[in-house]
Image: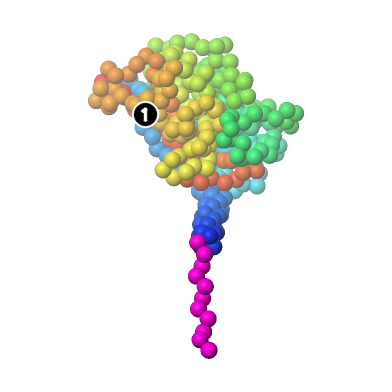
Amino acid sequence: MPSARARPRSGAAAAARGAALALAGVTGAGLAALAWGAGYEVRAPRLRRVEVPVLPPGARPLRVLHLSDLHMTPDQRVVPRWVAGLADLEPDLVVDTGDNLAALDAVPAVLRSLDRLLDRPGVFVLGSNDRYVPGRVNPLGYLGGPSRLAPRRQPLPTEDLVRGLVDRGWVDLDDARTTLELGGLRVDLVGVDDAHIGLDHYDAVRAPADPSADVSLGVMHAPYRRVLDPMARDGLDLLLAGHTHGGQVCVPLLGALVTNCDLPRRCASGLHRWRAGHGPVAPPAPEGARADERADETWLHVSAGLGTSPYARVRFACPPEATLLRLVPRAG
């Protein structure tokens, strides 16, 4: 008796099988990326080194360590130890752009991590997560625009954090100004409270950059345009911000999907040139930097930060970071 021949697979069945295999492949890749981001990358901080030409000709370089978004909880081990080791860099100035806390009992852990850095000159501003216990959020909600502060959020021990930093000599720049003498240079600084929750009052401390200062810095947690633009118009040389987490979960070749504010996605982290009323622009050519600079332009550095919400401890294509900014003379 002749053997029965296999019936040819129908086109619909083959397409369904192909779709199932593709879905399985995408799911597998997604799970692998999640495992990488939650298991390794979030615990693998890096130090970036960036050079910024903002000092007068002939001035010696200044080393500024930019920290942001530690989001610390007492159970963390790797990142706090790594932050503590940054004191070996011996920066001339430490700038902390907020969101240090992520738990009610995190203040001692933050102060331990920063202990030796608190022996260096430093300034700081606060973020919303230095004031309120983080809440559970749907990560997909960030795709719809900046997050909102939920009502009746439990307050954090903000005063304990501020007191711990100020008692060691750091300056609170929330809606405040100060001047520091660093390495023979006069550094003018102005900061604002967190614009993400509407606490910024730059107009209360606003003034043109001090012409007698060697360099003028603006410090903020959240880099909203309503803060960036007037600071640029006031002639500040460099603005420092955090808040964005660099996008936190980025797509290779595409970059950050969100910034959680009105900052363009391509400025989610790193050093950029910012023009008031316009946004990011190409930096001036090094050989003609002085002639090409506009009065309404400044440098902007956004830190991708070192932590995450305790309810979303994952990073992908966006490792935790601190930055050592080397401020150097402008072209003559």
Residue nearest the observer in this picture, 88 or 152 = 152
In the image, residue 33 above or below residue 322: below
Q: Position of residue 223 (x, y in %)?
A: 51, 25
Q: Residue at x 63, y 24 (%)?
A: 197
What percent of the width, then of the height, locates residue 195? 58, 22
Can residue 6 be seen in the rendering of this structure? yes
The answer to which of 304 and 172 lies nearer the viewer is 304
Q: Quadrant of the C terminus?
A: top left
Q: Nearer the viewer, residue 143 or 249?
A: 143
Residue 4 falls within the magenta-colored stretch: yes
Residue at image coords 62%, 20%: 199
> Measuring 52% from the left and 32% from the top, which residue is drawn there?
259
Most extreme residue toward the bottom is: 1
Place of residue 284 in the rendered image (x, y in percent of width and height, measured from the top left): 31, 24
Q: Which residue is labeled 1 in the image?
A: 52
How many C-alpha atoms fall within 10 Å of the one at disc 1: few (<14), some, or many (≥20)? some
Magenta highlight on residue 86: no
Give the residue furthest to the left.
287
Q: Is residue 107 left or right of residue 13?
A: right
Label the magenta part by its dominant secondary structure: loop
Question: In this rendering, would 88 be left or right of 69?
Answer: left
Residue 107 picture location, percent across and down: 66, 36
Q: Is residue 28 visible?
A: no
Callout 1: helix, strand or loop? Answer: strand
The magenta-colored residue range is 1-11
Q: Nearer the viewer, residue 27 or 149?
A: 27
At x 37%, y 14%, the residue is 295
